Image: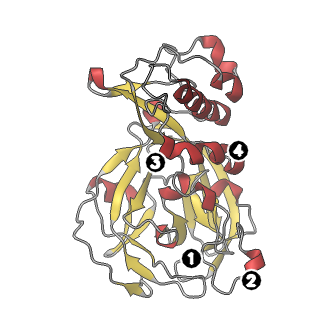
Amino acid sequence: MTILGIASQASAVTWAPSEYRCTFDQITNSSQAYGRQRWAQIQANKNLYQLAGKPKDSRFWSPVFTEDANTAYLTYQIYIYPVYVDPRVNYDIWIGPGAAGSQAQVTPSSWTLTGEQLAQLGHLEKPADVLNDGVCEPGCYTPDQQVLFEAGEQSISAAQSIGRADLITLSPDATLDNLTYIANPVATYTLDKDPAKQEILDFHMESGGSLSVTEHHPLVTSEGAVSKAMDFIPGEYLVKQDGTLDKILAIERREWFGKVYNLRPVSRDLTSNILVAQGYLNGSIRYQSEYVEELNRIILRNNVPADLVLGE
C-alpha cells in the first residue's frame, strides 16, 4: 500500500509494551459501569480511612479521572470505570461492585440495582490497602485487523506479539483535504488478558473493504469528526487512507469470543491519534479515555465554516 505524504518523526522507540483490558473485571452493562464510577467517587469523598486534611481518597477514585467519569456515560454513552489491585497479595485484582465475579464484595441482590442505587452502597468492605489501578476502556479491533506501520500493514495481534512500534498516523496538521502522515511510535498496546464474549460490528463497504471492531471503537466520519462505531448506519461513509469516502453498505452485529486489541501512539494531539486500519481512518484508544469530550467534534477541519465546528 502506498503511504501518502509521510513526514519523518524518527524515534528511538523500537519495542512497545502491552497492557491488559479489563476482562478480569469486566462490566458490559452501562448502568453498572456508571454505578461503579459514582460509587468510587462518593467513597473517595467520604474519607473512610481518616486521612489527614480530609482529601479525596485516590485509593477509590483518582482525581485525574473525574472529568471523564462524570461526562463519559451521561454525554457520550461510553463507560469507563475504576479497577483495583491488592498489594498485600502480589497486586492481584480486587473486584469492585457491578462486575461478574464480585459476589464477595456485593450481595447478589445488588445485581439488579440501578447505577445511582449502586452508587449509594457503602464502601463494601474494601480494605484500606486496596488501590485504584486505573480505569478500563472500551473500543478495540478483532485480532486479524490490518494496521498500517512504516513497513506496511500487519494484523494488530501479530504486531502486539512482537511489540512492533513503527506506527503510521496522521500528522498534526493533516486535514481531509490534505491527509499527510508521520511515523509515530506506539506507546502501548491494549488487549484482553483472557478471551471474552465481545459484541463485534462488521462494516461492509461499497468498495469491497471491511472493518471489524467493537461497538465503542472510534472511527472518522465523512465530516472529519471521530464517532463511535455503533453510531454509524448504512448509507454513511468511512474515510479511506487517501481521503476518499467509501459508502457503508451494511453493518452486521455479531457475538464473538476472543481477545480484542488497540493501541496508543506516543503523540498526544488529537489529529496524530488517528491511524489507518483496514485502509480506513480510526481513532486510537485515547478517544475512549483521555479524549472522550472530542467524540463527534470535528477534528480534520480544513475549510469547515466556524458555525459547523462542534464545541466552539
Q: Choose between 132 and 162: the one closer to the eye.
A: 132
Identify the amino acid type marked 3. Answer: Val
- In the image, what residue occupies the spot 48% across and 69% down? 269
Image mark for residue 74: 4
Instruction: Return the disc, 2 or 4, that comes first in the chain's sequence.
Output: 4
* Label 2 vs 1, first from the N-terminus: 1
Distance from disc 3 to disc 4, alpha carbons, whole Å, reads: 25 Å
Cα–Cα span, label 2 and label 3 = 38 Å
The image's mark for residue 240 is: 1
> Residue flagged by tag 1: what amino acid is it?
Lys
Q: Are marks 2 and 3 in contact (CB under 8 Å)?
A: no
Counting labels gives 4
Quarter of the view holding residue 24: top left
Q: Which residue is mark 2?
A: 305
Q: Earlier in the sequence, mark 3 or mark 4?
A: 4
Q: Is residue 130 visible?
A: yes
- The amino acid on which the numbered mark 2 sits, given as a three-letter code, is Pro
Label 1 to label 3: alpha-carbon separation: 22 Å
Which one is in front in this view, the residue at disc 1 or the one at disc 4? 4
Indicate the secondary structure of the residue bearing disc 3.
loop
In the rendered view, tell whether residue 48 sits above or below residue 30. above
Q: Position of residue 54 (x, y in %)?
A: 49, 28
Separation of marks 1 and 4 at Cα, in angstroms: 31 Å
* Residue 279 against residue 144 in the figure, above or below: below
Label 3: which residue? 260
